[in-house]
Image: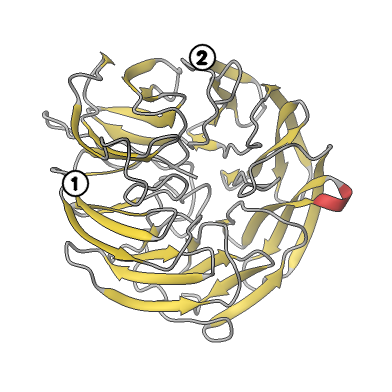
Amino acid sequence: MRSFAVLVSLVLMTNAPLPAAEQSTSDWPMWRGPAGDGRSTEAALPTKWSGSENIAWKTKIPGVGHSSPIISGDHIFVTTALEEETQRALICLDRKTGKIIWQKNIVRSMLEKKHRLNSYASATPATDGKLVFVTFFEQPKIQIAAFDFKGNEVWRVSPGEFKSVHGFCSSPVIYKDLLILNGDQDAEAYLVAYDKATGKERWRTDRPNKTRSYCTPVIVELAGKPQMMLSGSKCVASYNPMTGEQYWIIDGPTEQMVASLVHTKGIVFVTGGFPELHVLGIDPAGAGNVTKTHIRWHDGQNKGDRRLASYVPSPVAFGDWFFLVSDGGLATCFDARSGERLWQQPLGKHHSSSAVAGADGMLYFTSDAGETFVIKADGKFELVAKNSLGEDVRSSPAISGGQIFIRGVENLYCIGVPK
């Protein structure tokens, strides 16, 4: 679920991603990977497979969940909802074999009202290589829990009540010694950070509007400082991840956002929104309210082109370009600096999954029908391969050790030969 804004800096700045924790370079420790942007440091990843070809293993996952798998060393973690038992659970698998090592039921609560495309286990967990952190909704409150790799609960806290007619989803983000959560909702909205070792609250910052959104923050070094950026709650904003202090804010461009932000060449890209969809380019070097000064380009101002922007799928950046696929399956390549549309191409029908990229510029877009379109990152469209698992997919892929991990609606697939 996602939305974005593109930011062009007029000053000299770096844009190196900030690592979530001390992890192996092949780990995929949280939503959208080590930097939260869908990009892997690995190249020569698998480009061809089917439901029976180039599959190292597949494992049936009990229950239902749209959360993505995360990987740390020899461990894979996924969350799920056992709807008949009204249980929400964390599952640990062996990375090499796919065997389920343990399952811990974390929350038992009456099933909440949700959007038909949401699930009761949509939030992706996060890990620092020592603990794994999960978030669930136990009516009427959010629950955050930390477990060790043997399945022992270390701590549990609740940041407060949560209200949304579309259900719950908020994936935690790790930054240094903090675990950070976005609490946008149809009530008092906030960002909150906890000591990841103890669960003690370190800071809390109010969000400006009481509006549900589902954007996972992304943290990156821009304009000479670490910036935690997200869209939603009728704004796009940047914060100091260590303190929660707001650096800058842009009003709008619409009410609700889902997709995470990405960046390249000092530019941050924002897409999505409801009731209108927009694609934005924004300069992240400002301070205060920069609505009138730091939007460098804006595509979709005609009340939002629903064929152009993506609401749920997060985009991916590579080189001089931003790439996205709309919920309806139309892929677009944008020039990062100008916002010019360089190409558009239909990729199947409906998409919920967010794109990922290898270090060699191979992009992976997976549709709800379980078809993955492998595209070369370039200003001209080039389809490398189209692969079908034969199973519907609602989750986003993970990359680790030269392999791709895709969670279908029933099974978790490990694709390719390990390196």
Quadrant assignment, res 288: top left
* Residue 172 - label: none
Q: CA distance from mark 2 to mark 1?
A: 31 Å
Q: Does residue 141 lie above or below 56 as drawn?
A: above
Q: Which residue has dot 2 on it?
A: 206
Q: Is residue 155 left or right of residue 54?
A: right
Q: Is residue 172 left or right of residue 252?
A: right
Where residue 364 sits in the image (x, y, percent)?
39, 65
Quadrant assignment, res 330: bottom left
Q: Which residue has dot 1 on it?
A: 336
Mark 2 / mark 1, whichever is N-terminal: 2
Of residue 282 and residue 343, the one placed in the foreground of this image is 343
Q: Residues within 10 Å of mark 1 (few under 14, many from 20)?
A: many
Q: Does residue 254 lie above or below 302 as drawn?
A: above
Residue at 30% in and 34% down? 221
Residue at 49% in and 37% down? 216
Where residue 394 sits in the image (x, y, percent)?
57, 58
Where residue 357 sits in the image (x, y, percent)?
36, 60
Q: Amino acid at mark 2?
A: Asp
In this rendering, the count of numbered labels is 2
Q: Residues within 10 Å of mark 2 (few under 14, many from 20)?
A: some
Give the secondary structure at mark 2.
strand
Q: Amino acid at mark 1?
A: Ala
Where residue 109 sits in the image (x, y, percent)?
83, 37
Of residue 413 and residue 156, the one placed in the foreground of this image is 413
Q: Is residue 279 left or right of residue 178?
A: left
